[in-house]
Image (cartoon, coloured by chain):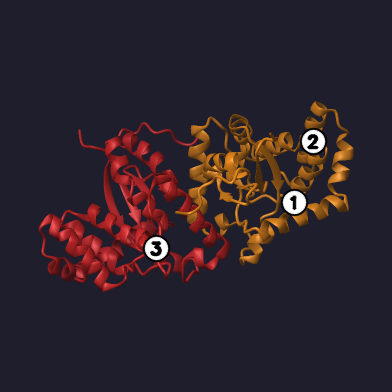
Chain colours: A orange, B red
């Protein structure tokens, strides 16, 4: 029998996606669930709602709380946290690169590396030098040509795939990052729902999940 | 030694506050923490942010998701859930009554009863008949005069206390419901943080909590 699947939808600019990215591999392995990495862009979704930046900037009390919340959660989990000087970061280049690494079979490792650089080290992931260094490190491990991967990430085919993936997200009602989507379409939002999403995914294919009471 | 305290801030219109209201008594007792009930009004805070209704109405994808999320969580916890026909409900009269029941020493029971009527039974808590019935039931149990309690709830002193309490909430950065606040000022938002808030409260008075890493 094929392992059940769960889609992990994330924008690289999202602090809460950082929390999930650093634990999803281990939790999914324990649950026997395969993760499908789905980078997408929240910016266009936010703009549709009339927001030109993160709601954490538009609503300062919520933004201050988010930082404190992430500080507490990362401390509990033994993770570093450093908010980059500019928040949110422009995640376009990283998302395109992620799709290129998916073709190369290493999107999980790349996604992990980007989130660590951004939120554990406070690096600027819109910066080409930062991304090149991450790619160089990754390709050394898996034996790929970094220049080819970087070139592929700006190929029109990849650019289109990211647009299509982000439009898909809108079409099934995605509105935040991270989100998780089971094979029956069930949607979960937020790092707080990762465990629940994995449990759901385990039975989604067998049609045995409880619907609303 | 006095038991540690945790403030429970809630707007009666909030679905996630329903989740917390139905489990906070038991969890707090187990943690040895005293809960201080703090009804307040989110409406003025939302209006400050340019919202004239719940964000769950302004952003429909988020609203649909919230309903599904509450359906799943209530099913897991063995609770009923029925969204009232009108959402959000006007929570002003219920909040004032809650402050009157606080004076009478029964705010915990009243708060529980309002949330059950609203979100388990789908009743309209802005309706005077609904509130009168809840008060009648409550006062039968604790031996109070329901007419006096209802009259007290529209006394200028109670109206002012609710205004002051809601202004207090803004002053320490509260932006959503439910929220929890420890005696050292540490703020937690959302039913998902109730356990973390109780753990924090247990040591807040002793100054031994971890600050940011």
The mark that comes first in sequence, 2 or 1, is 1
The total number of labels drawn is 3
Q: Which mark is residue A105?
A: 2
Q: Position of residue A66 (x, y in %)?
A: 51, 48
Q: Which residue is rendered at x = 58% and y = 62% of the image?
A: B61
Instruction: Give how far across and how far down residue B78 sits, in percent.
Output: 38, 47
Q: Is residue A35 above or below residue B181?
A: above
Judging by the rendered image, the residue that carries numbered circle 1 is: A92
Residue nearest the viewer, comparing B102 with B122: B122
What residue is disc 3 on?
Answer: B42
Mark 1 lies on a secondary structure that is helix
Q: Chain of mark 2?
A: A
Is residue A184 found left or right of A142 in the rendered image? Answer: left
Mark nearest the camera among 2 and 3 is: 2
The image shows residue B209, relative to residue B130, as above or below, that is above
Chain holding disc 3:
B
Marks 2 and 1 in Cβ contact (< 8 Å):
no
**Circles 3 and 1: CB atoms closer than 8 Å:** no
Where residue A24 sits, quadrant-wise, is top right
- From this viewpoint, is residue A45 visible? yes
Camera-nearest residue between B42 and B160: B42
Mark 2 neighbour density, 10 Å: few (under 14) some (14–19) many (20 or more): few
Looking at the image, residue B153 sits to the left or right of residue A74; the answer is left
């Amino acid at each position: 029998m094929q392992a059940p699947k769960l889609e992990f939808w994330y924008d690289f600019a999202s602090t809460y996606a950082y929390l999930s990215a650093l634990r999803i591999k281990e939790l999914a392995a324990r649950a026997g669930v395969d993760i499908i990495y789905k980078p997408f862009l929240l910016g266009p979704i936010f703009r549709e709602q009339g927001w030109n930046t993160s709601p954490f900037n538009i609503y300062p009390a919520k933004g201050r709380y988010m930082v404190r919340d992430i500080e507490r959660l990362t401390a509990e989990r033994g993770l570093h946290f450093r908010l980059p000087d500019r928040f949110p970061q422009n995640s376009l280049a990283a998302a395109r690169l992620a799709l290129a690494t998916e073709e190369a079979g290493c999107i999980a490792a790349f996604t992990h590396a980007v989130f660590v650089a951004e939120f554990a080290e406070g690096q600027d992931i819109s910066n080409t030098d930062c991304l090149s260094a991450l790619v160089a490190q990754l390709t050394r491990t898996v034996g790929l040509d970094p220049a080819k991967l970087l070139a592929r990430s700006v190929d029109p085919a990849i650019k289109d795939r990211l647009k299509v993936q982000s439009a898909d997200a809108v079409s099934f009602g995605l509105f935040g990052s991270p989100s998780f989507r089971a094979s029956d379409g069930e949607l979960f939002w937020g790092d707080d729902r990762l465990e629940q999403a994995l449990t759901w995914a385990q039975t989604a294919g067998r049609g045995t999940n409880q619907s609303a009471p």
